[in-house]
Image (cartoon, rainbow, N blue to C red):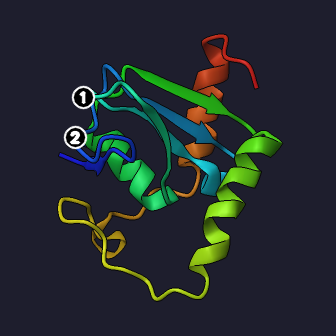
Amino acid sequence: MPHDNCDQCQEDYDFDGERDIAVLYLRDADCNHIEAHCPFCQSTARIYVEPEIFISLLGQVSFRTVRMYSDAPDDIKAGRRSLEAPQKDEPKALPPSGWVRTEDLPQIPRNWLTNLWDTFREFGGES
């Protein structure tokens, strides 16, 4: 089960589909994130996830709430950019144990997100 470490209380916890929220941006896939809630101290963290890993998480965790938008708002884009800036000079670290390597993920059909978006709109979603 995918997991994280709380920045506030330092406890390890698994992602919980009942408690956590997956947020998907169709045009800004690098801004996809999980709004994770620590079960120990109740703090909330926005965890940005690479598109390939995000798709894998959707298959591993049954999120009760998945929010889908066409574009990410400016504050989300700025938050993502601020996280990437200091990491450009740092060497890439190995992913934490329990995560799936992107090389091991199946290829997603090219029109998968388009079909998902069309289905979402059919059921009255907003763009």
Where residue 112 appears, x then y in whole percent? 53, 47
Q: Is residue 105 left or right of residue 111?
A: left
Q: Residue 97 falls in which quadrant of the image?
A: bottom left
Where residue 95 appears, x then y in whole percent? 30, 70
Q: Amino acid at mark 2?
A: Tyr
SS for dot 2:
strand
Residue at the spot of label 1: 40
Q: Residues within 10 Å of mark 1 (few under 14, many from 20)?
A: few
Whether residue 27 is situated above or below residue 122 in the rendered picture: below
SS for dot 1:
loop
Where residue 122 appears, x then y in whole percent? 64, 16
Q: Is residue 85 left or right of residue 5?
A: right
Q: How many marks?
A: 2
Q: Are marks 1 and 2 in contact (CB under 8 Å)?
A: yes
Q: Residue 24 falls in which quadrant of the image?
A: top right
Q: Nearer the viewer, residue 40 or 25?
A: 40
The mark nearer the N terminus, 1 or 2, is 2
Q: Amino acid at mark 1?
A: Phe
Kindly report which numbered mark, 1 or 2, lies closer to the viewer in this rendering: 1
Q: Nearer the viewer, residue 88 or 122?
A: 88
Residue 107 is tagged as none
Q: Residues within 10 Å of mark 2 (few under 14, many from 20)?
A: some
Whether residue 89 is situated above or below residue 84 in the rendered picture: below
Identify the residue at horizontal 61%, vertical 63% (top origin). Answer: 83
Identify the residue at horizontal 77%, vertical 43% (top origin). Answer: 75
Q: Nearer the viewer, residue 100 or 119?
A: 100
Residue 13 is tagged as 2
Where residue 46 appears, x then y in whole percent? 52, 41
Identify the residue at horizontal 71%, vertical 44% (top origin). Answer: 76
